[in-house]
Every structure is written in C-alpha cells, then in structure tokens.
Image (cartoon, helix red, strand yellow):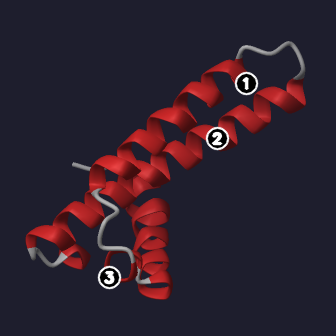
Amino acid sequence: MIDHVNLYLFHPLTVIFIEYTRLPYIFPWITANHISYLGVMFALIAARLVLSDKLIIRRIGVLAFFGRQFMDDLDGYIARCRLGIDAKKQ
C-alpha cells in the first residue's frame, strides 16, 4: 500500500513533471540512480536544516524532505520508463 501523500500529491506531480519536461527522452543518459543520488543530497541537506534552532530554517528543511520524496517518486517513474513498464498505471 502507498500512503496518501504519495498517492495524491507526489505521484501525480511526477507524472505531470515527466509529461511536460520529457526528461527520460530528452536526457537519456540520466538514470534512476542519478535521481536517487540527488534525493540523498536533498535528504542530507534537509536533515541539517531540521536541526537548526530557527523555526523558518526547520520549515525549509521540511520542504527539502518533500523534495527528497519527489525525487524518490521520480526515480521510480524513470526506472519503469526505462524498463518499458507503463508507469502511469503503477
């Protein structure tokens, strides 16, 4: 099962992002692993921001975690595109 935030927010955003940017087709050298590494970087930055004493910095850290989650959905979508699986039905 998938949680509601992924099902109703990040997955549709990923589909829209891929349809408008055509990322796997314009940049075929970008793999799902590249997106995963970028997601790890988002997570490390977000973890550092969440540890701040200032509330506004912690809120930016939460937004960075949302960016990490978007990268996670995006790398799964790109991996399914590379394998020839219809990612919209997943």
Q: Is residue 3 visible?
A: no
Q: Secondary structure at mark 3?
A: helix
**Label 3 sits on what residue type?**
Tyr
In the rendered image, the quadrant that contains the C terminus is bottom left
Q: Which mark's residue is nearer the viewer, 3 or 1? A: 3
Name the spot of residue 8 as percent of width and height, x first.
Answer: 44, 65
Residue 25: image tag: 3
Q: Earlier in the sequence, mark 2 or mark 3?
A: 3
Name the spot of residue 33 as percent of width and height, x first.
Answer: 29, 47
Where on the picture, by quarter, is residue 37?
Answer: top left
Q: Earlier in the sequence, mark 3 or mark 1?
A: 3
Q: Is residue 19 left or right of residue 89?
A: right
Q: Is residue 24 left or right of residue 64?
A: left
Give the residue pinned by disc 1: 49
The residue at the point 50 percent across, 87 percent down is: 20
The residue at the point 28 percent across, 65 percent down is: 77
**Label 1 sits on what residue type?**
Leu
Question: Residues at badges 1 and 2 in contact (C-beta under 8 Å)?
Answer: yes
How busy is the neighbourhood of tag 3: few (under 14 within 10 Å), some, or many (20 plus)?
A: few
* Disc 2 from disc 3: Cα separation: 26 Å
Frontmost residue, 57 versus 5: 57
Residue 64: image tag: 2
Name the spot of residue 16 as percent of width and height, x first.
Answer: 47, 80
The correct choice, above or below, for 84 with respect to 6 in the image is below
